[in-house]
Amino acid sequence: MPATNPDPTEVWENPVKKQIREGKAVIAATITVASPEIAARVATFGYDFLWIEMEHSPITLETLRNMVLATRGLPAIPFARVPVNELWTAKRVLDQGVMGVIFPFSSTPELAQQAAAACRYPPRGRRGYGPGLASFRWPAAGSYQDSVDREIVVIAMIEEARAVEQIEVIAATPGVDVLVVGTSDLSFSMGLRGQSDHPKVQEALEKVVAACKANHKAAGLPVKDLGQVERYQAQGFQLFQTQTELGLMARGAQQILESFGRQPPDAYKGFIY
């Protein structure tokens, strides 16, 4: 789909933010390979947004910029998970034109407040002004700074037990739209080493959902299959981070090989990353 010039009379709404506000499920594909071509192709598959992974992948700022440009006019919009919750990491990805920022290990009310402030210009926040590249990609006409302050999606990740202990205060943070539970990291912080289905982790998920509902925020988490989606959606989760492009490739290859009566090597059976 070719990019079109925005109508100067229209007020652009971030489609992910709109769906969250309407109570609809939001689905992300995770991008870990430093390829604008792959990002652009995945952006046509039907996902709501791309979760461009800059914490656990070799994707650089320059590659992010190319992905942002490559997906211009395509259905899925680009978000970036920054390596660390800092003002400068958010500023750098925002200035490339992303439409949502994901902040890892936002384990205190202060870090949640920092995430919200990092994504907005003063007086609402602390973002530095230099939007030349970002405004070129941003769909809205007119004032970029007013549009982005209103329509950016801010996601704070809950990945430690201490965050769950303060979840009511974190969820009440103005300017944070979604709390996403990193279930694997949360389980490690509880001494459970990846046991995401452990009762203690599930109890924590219930606390996060309750805090989000009380504060009119969306709750999210990573999912591996349809069964998990149905289970967690019924529990009140609304945003779902799904497989990486590598996981999609492995799943597609497995289906083709099985049609020939073949199985993948043992090392790759059940590959879901």
Image (tube, rainbow, N blue to C red):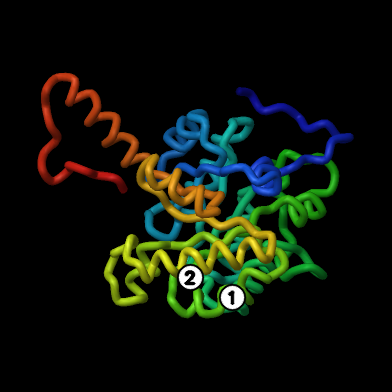
Q: Residues within 10 Å of mark 1 (few under 14, many from 20)?
A: some
Q: Quadrant of residue 195?
A: bottom left
User: What residue lies at 57% left-to-right and 71% top-to-bottom?
Assistant: 86
Residue pointed to by mark 1:
111
| Quadrant of the rendering where the N terminus is positioned | top right
Q: Compared to 133, does 189 lie above or below?
A: below
Q: Nearer the viewer, residue 157 or 212?
A: 212
Q: Quadrant of residue 9?
A: top right
Specify the label residue 105 is tagged with.
2
Asked whether disc 1 touches disc 2, contact meaning CB atoms under 8 Å apart, the reply is: yes
Q: Compared to 4, does 273 lie above or below?
A: below
User: What residue lies at 46% left-to-right and 33% top-to-bottom?
Assistant: 42
- Is residue 30 something that shows in the picture? no
Give the secondary structure at mark 2: loop
Three-letter code for the amino acid on which mark 1 is drawn: Leu
- Give residue 87's position: percent from left, percent from top: 61, 70
- Give residue 213's position: percent from left, percent from top: 64, 61
Three-letter code for the amino acid on which mark 2 is drawn: Phe
- Is residue 152 something that shows in the picture? yes
Q: Earlier in the sequence, mark 1 or mark 2?
A: 2
- Give residue 218's position: percent from left, percent from top: 61, 56
Give the secondary structure at mark 1: helix
Q: Compared to 82, does 41 lie above or below?
A: above
Q: Nearer the viewer, residue 89 or 246?
A: 246
User: What residue lies at 70% left-to-right and 48% top-to-bottom?
Assistant: 21
- Give residue 166's position: percent from left, percent from top: 56, 79
